[in-house]
Image: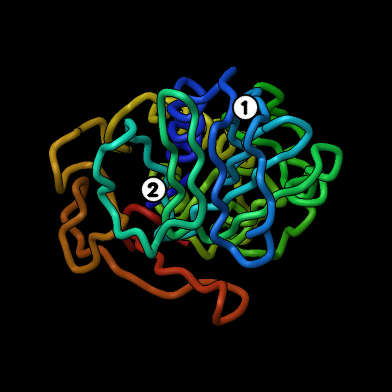
Amino acid sequence: MPEGDTVYQTARRLNAALGGSVLTGCDIRVPAFATVDLTGETVHEVVSRGKHLLMHVGGFTIHSHLKMEGTWRLYHHGERWTRPAFEARIVLQTADRQAVGFALGELDVVARDCEVDLVGHLGPDLLGPDWNEAEAIRRLAQHPEQAIAVALLDQRNLAGLGNVYVNELCFLRGMLPTRPVAEVDLPAAVALARRLITANRDRPERTTTGELRRGRRTWVYGRAGESCRRCGTRIQQMRLGRTELEQRDTFFCPHCQPN
């Protein structure tokens, strides 16, 4: 599932392959930007901002968000694509490589000075060079009655956490996802969030338990009905969110995570 660490790794791979290169081809298969052609422009850098990926090309920014199904893949010229061509939203080529964005949830091309319109609302980036823990805590504390899981998922508070990390963080801090923000030790929660995502930014597989074996990588996420790894209590599941569209599946141990 794409979260901040996934996008960070994607940006790093794309930057290593494309950074400093001139585009020899640009095919954007989204109606709003189908006429945009950045062929001849230089890819200055590819960076992540929370769950958003920003490709700085010439005086423009190619912005993408993976959502649930999206991915960027790199190929050598002539290499067969590993996903169907109809899923391709953008194809960028250099003299050496081809980068294809498949099933991207969002894709925009804007002038560099308009980039803030796309990501300016985001809170401090947990994996960013300008990470600001105090600002993240301040933003979270502005909504004292909100459920902590909802607040942590709100990218306007801090950027990079998805449902996996939030569920695991709540378990590790021993708090129900529904606990009000006002009753949470925010500095401890934010510090742990940063440690978790930082520990995984260079791993091929995400783990919050320290184990890399399939089926052993999470404490509660995706484990409804299974036994808690700590106490043996059956893991429970519920839906949590402000609206139906925002609701997420939430997993917790009723014994290890008291209200």
Compared with residue 146, is residue 19 higher up or lower down, i.e. above or below? above
Q: Establish if 35 lies above or below 80.
A: below
Whether residue 250 is visible: yes
Q: Looking at the picture, tell me which residue is in the foreground, 30 or 24.
A: 24
Give the residue type at disc 2: Glu
Q: Is residue 55 left or right of residue 94?
A: right
Q: Are marks 2 and 1 in contact (CB under 8 Å)?
A: no
- Where residue 41 sits, quadrant-wise, is top right
Residue 60, placed above or below residue 225 = above
Query: Residue at horizontal 82%, vertical 50%?
Result: 117
Name the side, left or right, on which 230 lies relative to 43.
left
Dot 1: element: strand
Where is residue 255? Give x, y as percent: 31, 58
| Residue depicted at x 29% and y 68% | 236
Residue 223 horizontal side relative to residue 132, left or right: left
Extreme right residue here?
A: 113
Nearest to the observer: residue 185 or residue 168: 168
Residue 258: image location, x then y, percent:
42, 58
Kindly identify which residue carries mark 1: 43
Q: At 52% from the left edge and 61% from the top edge, which residue is drawn?
A: 105
Locate residue 224 relative to residue 99 in the image: left or right: left
Residue type at numbered disc 1: Val
- The residues tagged by marks 2 and 1 sit, at their Cα atoms, a distance apart of 37 Å
Q: Report the residue at 33% width, 63% height from top.
A: 254
**Residue 141 appears in the figure:** no
- Mark 1 Cα within 10 Å, few/some/many (few <14, many 20+)? many
Nearer the N terminus, badge 2 or badge 1? 1
How many residues crowd around disc 2 within 10 Å: few (fewer than 14), some, or many (20 or more)? many
Q: What residue does disc 2 label?
A: 168
Q: Position of residue 208 (x, y in %)?
A: 32, 38
